[in-house]
Image (spheres, grey):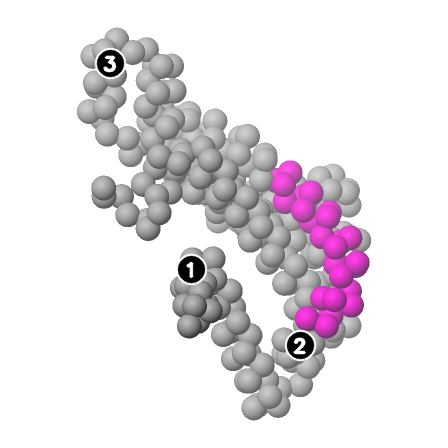
């Protein structure tokens, strides 16, 4: 009875819920493949994908490193440039009127269309992949940071001014702490898009990386290998997202979004 209660508690825990959902999806996937007799070259069974992950693990691990480096490089550039640009936009309506339309315009241009230009300009190294990852990850950081900075209660700013707090002190004590949840929200979106951007860069011109493995598998109609590469790519995005979520928890444990149960009311 105690064992049953422990299993129920484990199944109802937040950590187990996504695993249970994944298990349900895999079982449904396997059943659908068997019932409709879908051939492996269209949709492989989960067991074939797992076998391919195990068999090709050295290859997948080796090729995931260039993708990881490009992702982290693009993400760091997104944060390094995105947050200062957001500060400029939030501090001046004049700057916002100049920059914001250009940022929106830049997002309307398909990255897969301009990625070949980066290969022409910078060669087949890691630089074009970093730029592609940066372009996809930059916009969410700017938008979320601007929104977070503009959402601060004006009464708190007026209170700080009445207490003779200077602009720098007001920013460090009020604006920045209250904007951190929004900034981290943008960063978490940015890190997942940076993974996509790195793969886009590898599609255009590369002889390494998960994007290169996907191209090879697609050319050979090796669907199990393609799904295995997609699994590794997805796990990379999940791990990076969780790392940022942990950093957010360490930096702003006081925020309502970090409290147990997700409730802001005390």
Q: Quadrant of residue 255?
A: top left
Confirm whether residue 145 shows in the render: no
Above or below, comparing residue 224 to residue 64 in the picture = below
Identify the residue under disc 2.
47
Does 218 appear in magenta? Answer: no
Give 227 or 20, whichever is nearer the viewer.
20
Main SS of the magenta segment?
Answer: helix
Say left or right for 45 vs 165: right
Q: Position of residue 230 (x, y in %)?
A: 64, 63
Mark 3 and mark 1 lie on one chain; the one further toward the N terminus is 1
- Picture coordinates of residue 248, whole percent (x, y): 46, 38
Q: Tell me which label, 2 or 3, sits earlier in the chain.
A: 2
- Residue under label 3: 161
Q: Is residue 216 left or right of residue 247?
A: right
The label number, if any, that marks residue 13 in the structure image: 1
Residue under the point 42% across and 25% down: 88
Crowding around mark 3 (Cα neighbors within 10 Å: few <14, some 14 to 19, many 20+) is some
Q: Nearer the viewer, mark 3 or mark 1?
A: 1
Query: Mark 1: which secondary structure?
Result: loop
Which residue occupies the extreme front position in the image?
1
Q: Which residue is found at the position 25% from the left and 16% from the top?
A: 160
- Residue at the image position 55 percent from the left and 44 percent from the top: 243
- Residue at position x 63%, y 57% in the image: 233
Q: Where on the picture, by quarter, is residue 142?
A: top left
Examine the structure image and report whether residue 51 is included in the region drawn in magenta.
yes
**Span of residues in magenta:** 50-74
């Amino acid at each position: 009875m105690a064992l049953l209660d422990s299993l129920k508690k484990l199944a109802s825990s937040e950590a187990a819920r996504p695993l249970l959902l994944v298990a349900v999806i895999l079982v449904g996937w396997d059943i659908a493949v068997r019932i409709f007799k879908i051939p492996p070259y269209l949709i492989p069974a989960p067991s074939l994908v797992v076998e391919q992950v195990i068999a090709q693990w050295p290859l997948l691990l080796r090729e995931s490193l260039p993708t990881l480096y490009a992702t982290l490089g693009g993400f760091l550039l997104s944060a390094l440039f995105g947050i200062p640009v957001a500060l400029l936009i939030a501090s001046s309506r004049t700057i916002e009127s100049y920059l914001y339309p250009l940022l929106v315009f830049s997002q309307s241009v398909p990255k897969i269309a301009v990625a070949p230009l980066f290969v022409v300009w910078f060669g087949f190294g890691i630089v074009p992949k970093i730029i592609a990852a940066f372009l996809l990850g930059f916009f969410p950081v700017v938008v979320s940071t601007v929104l977070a900075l503009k959402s601060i209660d004006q009464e708190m700013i007026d209170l700080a001014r009445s207490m003779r707090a200077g602009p720098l002190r007001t920013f460090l004590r009020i604006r920045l702490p209250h904007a951190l949840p929004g900034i981290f929200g943008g960063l978490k979106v940015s890190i997942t898009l940076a993974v996509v951007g790195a793969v886009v860069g590898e599609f255009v011109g590369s002889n390494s990386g998960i994007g290169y493995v996907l191209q090879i598998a697609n050319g050979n109609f090796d669907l199990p290998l393609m799904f295995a590469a997609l699994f590794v790519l997805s796990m990379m995005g999940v791990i990076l997202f969780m790392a940022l979520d942990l950093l957010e928890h360490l930096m702003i444990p006081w925020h309502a979004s970090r409290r147990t149960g997700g409730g802001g009311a005390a």
